[in-house]
Image: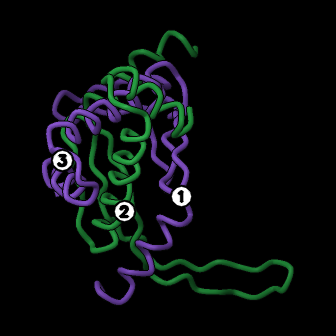
Chain colours: A purple, B green
Amino acid sequence: MTKADIVNEVAKGTGYEKVMVQKIIEAFMDSVKTSMEKGNDVFLRGFGSFVITKRAAKTARNISKNTTIVIPERFVPVFKPSKEFSEEVTKSLATSKK
Amino acid sequence: MTKADIVNEVAKGTGYEKVMVQKIIEAFMDSVKTSMEKGNDVFLRGFGSFVITKRAAKTARNISKNTTIVIPERFVPVFKPSKEFSEEVTKSLATSKK
């Protein structure tokens, strides 16, 4: 599924025009991104949370040049699906994908 | 930030009514969830991808009862932020949170 597919589904389901649905979905994604860039987590009840997580500094190697570089401590966006979301995916795929 | 905060921001930014924005955002989240429950990954350009990932079976222990249980292989929803999203968060928080 792509963004276009999701827009189509939402437009069909809600009865709103595709153009409007697309604008709102784009604005939603921008709003989540902007919030996280400011360091604010986003909690979406029933869906999940987008949270800022610290990744420890780590050492990486460039094998072809035989050098070592240090990747410093950094913050990355992580999504934690709601319990409901996770359980529904696990449950519905338990039988179908086995 | 909660869903209500995001709805407010999107309504302000786009000029659409809150009620409509909320309905569309709820429908968007439902659409992503339903898609994943069917085993379909969702690719949202510029934002990231929601993908089904297999978790290997693992053994867990109930320490108080001194028993071992096996958690079987299962599928869970995972979000992979776009390179752009990750980099922007890392960059903008590199200075502010240090």
Nearer to us in this view, A56 or B20: B20
Q: Residues within 10 Å of mark 2 (few under 14, many from 20)?
A: many
| Percent position of residue B2, x then y | 56, 37
Residue at 53% x, 31% y: name it: B5
Q: Judging from the image, what secondary structure is the residue with disc 3 in?
A: helix
Q: Quadrant of residue A94?
A: bottom left
| Percent position of residue B31, x then y | 30, 59
User: How many angstroms separate mark 2 from mark 1 (CA)?
Assistant: 11 Å
Query: Mark 2 — on which chain does it sit?
Result: B
Residue at 50% x, 72% y: name it: A87
Residue wearing tag 3: A3
Residue A91 appearing in the image: yes
User: How many angstroms separate mark 3 from mark 1 (CA)?
Assistant: 21 Å
Q: As shown in the figure, which amino acid type bears the numbered disc 1? A: Ser
Nearer to us in this view, A18 or B74: A18
Q: Judging from the image, what secondary structure is the residue with disc 2 in?
A: helix
Which label sits on residue A15?
none
Which label sits on residue B33?
2
Residue at 69% x, 86% y: name it: B68
The answer to whether A30 is drawn above or below residue B97 in the figure is below
Residue wearing tag 1: A82
| Percent position of residue A35, x then y | 46, 25
User: How many angstroms separate mark 3 from mark 2 (CA)?
Assistant: 14 Å
The answer to whether A75 is drawn above or below residue B36 in the figure is above
Count of marks placed on residues:
3
